[in-house]
Image (cartoon, grey):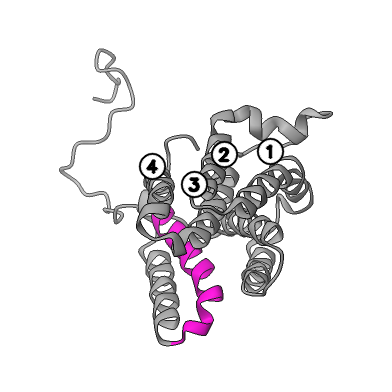
C-alpha cells in the first residue's frame, strides 16, 4: 500500500504539523488533534499491513513496527507537543496508549478480526465511535481512537472502492457530523470521530477514484501489451 493513498499520507503529515502548532495557536484543540492523529494512524497502519498470514513466533507482535519503524516518531512528537503545552498528563497518556496499541491492541485485533466482513465491521465501528463519546480515562480514550481507525480501515477495505456514489455517501456523513457539532455542541464528542473517519474515507476514495468505463468501439487503436519491437502475427 506504500504510495497508493498519497492524499491520506499528506493529510496525516499536515495533521501532525497542525498539532505541533496547537500550543501556540489554539491549545484547546490539542486533545482533539491527538485523537485524530491516533485515529488516522490506526487507519493508515491497517492499510499498509496487508499480510495474508501471520508471522511465526514473537515476530508477529512487532512485524508491523519493523515494517515502518519511523512511524513511531509521530507518537513521540505528539507527546512532546503535549509537554510543550504544559499537559504532562496527556504526554504520559499518549506514550502509554502508543505502547499498548503497538504491542498489544493491534496484534490482537489482527488475529481476532483481521478478516472480518463489512456487515460485521460496521457495527463494531459504530460501537467504538459511541464509546469515544463517553467519559473515561484519557489513555483508554486514545486506545479506542486508534482501534476506531483500524476498524474504519477494515470496513473501507471490504467496501466498494473507486465509486463516486461511495464518495458521495462519506462526504454527506462528514457534512452531517459537522452540522450536528455546530447545531448541537453537546454532540461534539461523537461528531468529531465520525468526521475524522469520514475525512479518512473521503481521502482514500479520492485516491482510488476510477474514470468512467469507455465501451470499446471500432476505429480505436487497441492497447499494445507487447514491446514495440515485437509485432503480432495478426497485425
Q: Position of residue 25 (x, y in %)?
A: 35, 57
Q: Mark 1 highlights which residue?
A: 52
Q: Residue at x 47, y 83 (%)?
A: 185
For mark 3, give the secondary structure.
helix
Q: Mark 4 highlights which residue?
A: 6
Q: Position of residue 195 (x, y in %)?
A: 46, 68
Please tell me whether mark 4 or mark 1 is closer to you in this view. 4
Count of number-bearing discs: 4
Q: Residue at x 55, y 74 (%)?
A: 189
Foreground residue, 145 or 97? 97
Magenta span covers which residues? 184-205
Give how far apart the Cα atoms at labels 3 and 4 are.
30 Å
First along the sequence among labels 4 and 1: 4
Give how far apart the Cα atoms at labels 1 and 2 are.
30 Å
For mark 2, give the secondary structure.
helix
Based on the displayed image, in which of its 4 quarters is residue 180 positioned? bottom left
Foreground residue, 9 or 222? 9
Residue neighbourhood size for the residue with mark 4, other residues' Cα within 10 Å, grouped as few (<14), some (14–19), many (≥20): some
Please tell me whether mark 3 or mark 2 is closer to you in this view. 3
First along the sequence among labels 1 and 2: 1
Disc assigned to residue 76: 2
Above-or-below relation of 92 to 130: above
First along the sequence among labels 3 and 4: 4
Q: Residue at x 79, y 52 (%)?
A: 112
Amino acid at each position: 500500500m506504500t504510495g497508493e493513498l498519497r492524499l491520506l499520507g499528506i493529510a496525516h503529515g499536515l495533521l501532525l504539523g497542525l498539532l505541533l502548532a496547537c500550543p501556540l495557536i489554539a491549545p484547546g484543540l490539542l486533545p482533539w488533534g491527538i485523537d485524530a492523529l491516533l485515529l488516522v494512524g490506526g487507519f493508515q497502519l491497517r492499510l499498509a499491513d496487508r499480510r495474508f498470514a501471520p508471522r511465526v513466533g514473537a515476530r508477529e507482535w512487532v512485524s508491523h513496527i519493523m515494517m515502518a519503524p519511523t512511524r513511531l516518531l509521530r507518537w513521540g512528537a505528539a507527546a512532546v507537543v503535549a509537554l510543550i503545552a504544559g499537559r504532562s498528563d496527556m504526554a504520559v497518556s499518549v506514550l502509554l496508549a502508543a505502547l499498548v496499541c503497538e504491542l498489544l491492541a493491534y496484534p490482537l485485533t489482527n488475529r481476532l478480526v483481521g478478516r472480518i466482513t463489512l456487515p460485521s465491521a460496521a457495527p463494531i465501528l459504530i460501537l467504538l465511535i459511541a464509546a469515544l463519546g463517553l467519559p473515561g480515562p484519557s489513555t483508554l480514550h486514545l486506545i479506542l481512537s486508534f482501534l476506531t481507525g483500524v476498524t474504519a480501515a477494515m470496513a473501507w477495505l471490504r467496501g466498494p472502492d473507486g465509486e463516486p456514489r461511495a464518495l458521495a455517501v462519506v462526504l454527506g456523513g462528514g457534512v452531517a457530523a459537522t452540522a450536528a457539532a455546530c447545531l448541537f455542541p453537546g454532540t461534539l464528542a461523537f461528531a468529531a470521530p465520525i468526521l475524522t473517519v469520514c475525512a479518512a474515507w473521503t481521502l482514500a476514495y479520492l485516491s482510488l477514484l476510477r474514470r468512467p468505463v469507455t465501451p470499446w468501439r471500432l476505429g480505436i487503436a487497441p492497447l499494445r501489451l507487447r514491446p514495440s519491437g515485437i509485432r503480432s502475427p495478426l497485425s
